């Protein structure tokens, strides 16, 4: 009986998740609101995104039938992200084991993975709208965290919330500069067209 | 060519259906997670929850500033105003202490009739023996009018079940103190947590108590 090896992306994703969930790492990242939102959640999503490299083309084609140019995947990503952006969800994920498990499963599988599958298929306009909305969210939430006089999470201190707000404004600003740079000097579709055949529609 | 266009339309149709279903499911999940878009934070959620469904409180053994022992169940029959403090607290508890001192004066009538009682519970029992609790009370009020007592839970388990039942989260800060969701909790004569008020919102709180007492 031959031992079947997991594909490289799956092994990398599993390694990343295992490192993130190792008790000292997890504890450290969940000790502050800033680390949880700006390090832990993005890295969990990145693990899911790595996984998307292992999805067989046959499955991708099937998904594409229900997610034309990655649109349904994008909706899934947005809805799941909206849920985890609720201060209440973040609080609950810190204090309740079951919610914590839900977070560690859903962020890679319902945010990172569908994003990795959808992004290469998305058209210029959808990508542009998504990126602008993404940057806008950083500004909106960052501003809220920075100026809110009350703590939004019972598990985190006000100073931490304000530091997160400041960091999010800085990241949002950086993304905006990058986006403006791309708009003026770059092309959004430049790297996708070489990786994916954009349309599965049979040409006759 | 015709078949290609049909296939594209089928894909768009399916995508619309799938996206619509996801949005609907997401909306339902978000509504459920926020009590119908009312409570986006844990703090609001616990207030919405107790107003909807009063919470039973555990009969945890407490020791007050004079060393007397009792449980919350012993205080049944009165309306209780409960806050959570630690006596070394430099910030919120100072506001809470001031609020309670003011409430003790303003509610002197119902307190004298034995219908209202104020109770400050320490979540730092090892640092807050009766002497510290007594000093905390002295710091805020001119004279003891008998309507406000401070107490500490006698066991760590008792403390945990109390904070869990009230929905109080205590986290350590960098200065060796604590940060906590400070509020004033209203317990009815049956010993159930029925409402939670913000600090510094005494008019609203007094109004609520007077309405309950006049019933």
Image: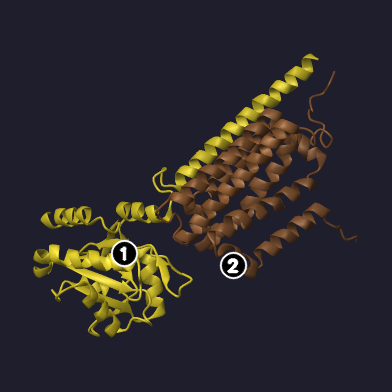
Chain colours: A brown, B yellow
Could you say where residue B118 lies in the image, as x and y percent from the top left? 21, 69
- Taking B67 as reference, is B108 left or right? left
**Which secondary structure, mark 1?**
strand
Q: Say above or below: B57 vs A123.
A: below
Could you say where residue A133 lies in the image, as x and y percent from the top left? 58, 37
Q: Quadrant of residue A119?
A: top right
Quarter in which the C terminus of chain A is drawn: top right
Q: Say above or below: A154 vs B76.
A: above
Q: CA distance from mark 1 to mark 2?
A: 32 Å
**Which secondary structure, mark 2?**
helix
Is disc 2 surrounded by few (<14), some (14 to 19) or many (20+) residues within 10 Å? some
Q: Report whether residue B74 is seen.
A: no
Quarter in which the N terminus of chain A is drawn: bottom right
Residue extending farthest right: A2
Check residue A27 in the rendering and tell me which mark sits there, or answer none: 2
Callout 2: chain: A
Nearer to us in this view, B75 or A49: A49
Q: Residue at left 38%, top 52%?
A: B44
Q: Which residue is mark 1?
A: B56
Q: Quadrant of residue B17?
A: top right
- Taking A82 as reference, is B54 left or right? left
Q: Residue at left 88%, top 61%?
A: A3
Q: Quadrant of residue A134?
A: top right
Is disc 1 surrounded by few (<14), some (14 to 19) or many (20+) residues within 10 Å? some
Q: Report whether residue A146 is seen.
A: yes
Q: Say above or below: B191 vs B158.
A: above
Could you say where residue A176 lies in the image, as x and y percent from the top left? 63, 40
Check residue A60 in the rendering and tell me which mark sits there, or answer none: none
């Amino acid at each position: 009986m031959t031992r079947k090896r997991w594909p490289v992306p799956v092994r990398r994703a599993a390694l990343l998740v295992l490192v993130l969930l190792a008790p000292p790492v997890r504890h450290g990242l969940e000790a502050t609101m800033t680390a949880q939102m700006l390090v832990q959640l993005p890295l969990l999503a990145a693990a899911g995104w790595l996984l998307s490299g292992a999805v067989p083309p046959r499955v991708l084609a099937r998904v594409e039938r229900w997610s034309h140019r990655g649109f349904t995947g994008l909706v899934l990503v947005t809805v799941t992200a909206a849920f985890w952006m609720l201060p209440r969800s973040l609080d609950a994920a810190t204090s309740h084991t079951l919610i914590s498990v839900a977070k560690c499963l859903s962020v890679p599988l319902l945010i990172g993975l569908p994003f990795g599958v959808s992004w290469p298929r998305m058209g210029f306009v959808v990508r542009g709208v998504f990126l602008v909305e993404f940057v806008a969210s950083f500004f909106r939430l960052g501003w809220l965290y920075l100026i809110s006089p009350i703590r939004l999470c019972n598990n985190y201190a006000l100073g931490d919330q304000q530091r997160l707000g400041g960091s999010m404004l800085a990241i949002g600003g950086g993304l905006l500069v990058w986006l403006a740079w791309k708009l003026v000097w770059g092309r959004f579709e430049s790297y996708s067209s070489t990786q994916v055949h954009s349309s599965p529609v049979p040409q006759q | 060519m015709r078949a290609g266009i049909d296939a594209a339309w089928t894909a768009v149709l399916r995508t619309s259906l799938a996206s619509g279903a996801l949005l609907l499911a997401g909306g339902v999940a978000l509504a459920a997670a926020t009590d119908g878009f009312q409570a986006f934070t844990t703090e609001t959620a616990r207030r919405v929850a107790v107003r909807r469904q009063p919470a039973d409180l555990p009969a945890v053994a407490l020791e007050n500033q004079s060393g007397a022992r009792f449980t919350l169940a012993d205080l049944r029959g009165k309306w209780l105003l409960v806050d959570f403090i630690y006596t070394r607290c430099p910030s919120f508890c100072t506001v809470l202490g001031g609020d309670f001192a003011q409430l003790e004066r303003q509610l002197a009538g119902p307190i004298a009739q034995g219908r209202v009682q104020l109770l400050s519970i320490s979540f730092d029992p090892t640092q807050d023996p009766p002497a510290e609790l007594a000093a905390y009370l002295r710091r805020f009020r001119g004279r003891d009018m008998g309507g406000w007592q401070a107490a500490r839970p006698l066991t760590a388990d008792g403390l945990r079940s109390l904070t869990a039942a009230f929905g109080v989260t205590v986290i350590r800060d960098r200065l060796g103190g604590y940060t906590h969701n400070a509020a004033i909790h209203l317990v009815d004569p049956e010993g159930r947590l029925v409402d939670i008020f913000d600090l510094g919102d005494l008019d609203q709180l007094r109004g609520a108590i007077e309405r309950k007492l006049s019933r």
